[in-house]
Image: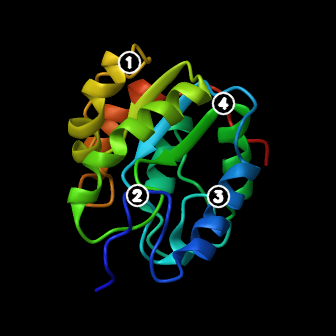
Amino acid sequence: MNPPASTHNVTVDGDTEARARREAAAAEFRPGHISTLLVAEAPPSALDRYFYFLDVDVQDSLFRHVIEATFGEKPTRDKRPWLDALKNAGYFLLDLSPDPFDDPSVLRPLVPTLVTRCARLRPERIVLIGARVYDLAYGALHAAQLPVVDVRLPIPGYGQRQRFLDLATPVLATNRAPSR
């Protein structure tokens, strides 16, 4: 097992390059104005499975289910039109932890930084993905008077696909289909 990522802006085991790759991929699809900020727990430990990477062959459930809840369609493996559609609709995803971790205790100290990051992005609304993210961050985001949605979404990859879609679709659905 890898040691947990640091709770500061320093990574371990050469993760600096991996973080830079993730940040560059996300920056390409960051909208100028964020209508909906999605906050997930952390990027996957497998570097090739990140939400904003274009070539993800397996285990891309968060991406697939966010697209399905948002646009009402199951995405193809060609992620670019879907990521462009998210960007055009003003949707952006970031993670509570910028790095994968083994020990969930690293998350709580990251919440104040998340609040600052969210405030800086000035989204119209914030949607938390995952019960742990909701439990840790909802109160702090709400106390900071940020527009956090009071819906406790499960992580869709843990056998919670239908529950995620049932709860997320009314929150995320948009009529803006991707141009393909």
The x, y position of residue 15, in whole percent, is 52, 76
- Residue nearer the viewer, 37 or 141: 141
Mark 3 to mark 1: distance in Å? 25 Å
Q: Which residue is drawn at 40% across and 13% down?
A: 145
The numbered mark, 3 or 1, whose residue comes first in the sequence reads: 3
- SS class, disc 2: loop
Report, in whole angstroms, how far the alpha carbon at label 4 lies from the one at label 1: 22 Å
What residue would you read off at disc 3? 23
Mark found first going from the N terminus, 4 or 1: 4
Mark 3 in CB contact with mark 2 (< 8 angstroms): no
**Vertical relation: 73 (above or below) 9:** above
Residue 89, by quadrant, is top right
Secondary structure of the residue carrying tag 3 is helix
Q: Which amino acid does label 1 sit on?
A: Ala
Say which amino acid is labelled 2. Ala
Residues tagged 2 and 4 counted as in contact (Cβ below 8 A):
no
Find the distance from the CA under tag 2 to the CA under tag 4.
21 Å
- Using the rendered view, name the quadrant where residue 158 is placed: bottom left
Residue type marked 4: Gly
Mark 4 vs mark 1: in front: 1
C-beta proximity under 8 Å, tags 4 and 3: no
Q: 59 or 15: nearer the eye?
A: 15
Which residue is under mark 2?
42
Query: Residue 21: x percent and y percent?
Result: 66, 68
Q: Viewer-nearest of labels 4 and 3? A: 3
The disc, 2 or 4, on the residue closer to the chain's N-terminal end is: 2
Quick one: SS at disc 1?
loop
Within 10 Å of disc 3 (Cα), the crowding (few <14, some 14-19, many 20+) is some
The residue that disc 1 covers is 144
Q: How far apart are marks 3 and 2 (CA)?
A: 13 Å
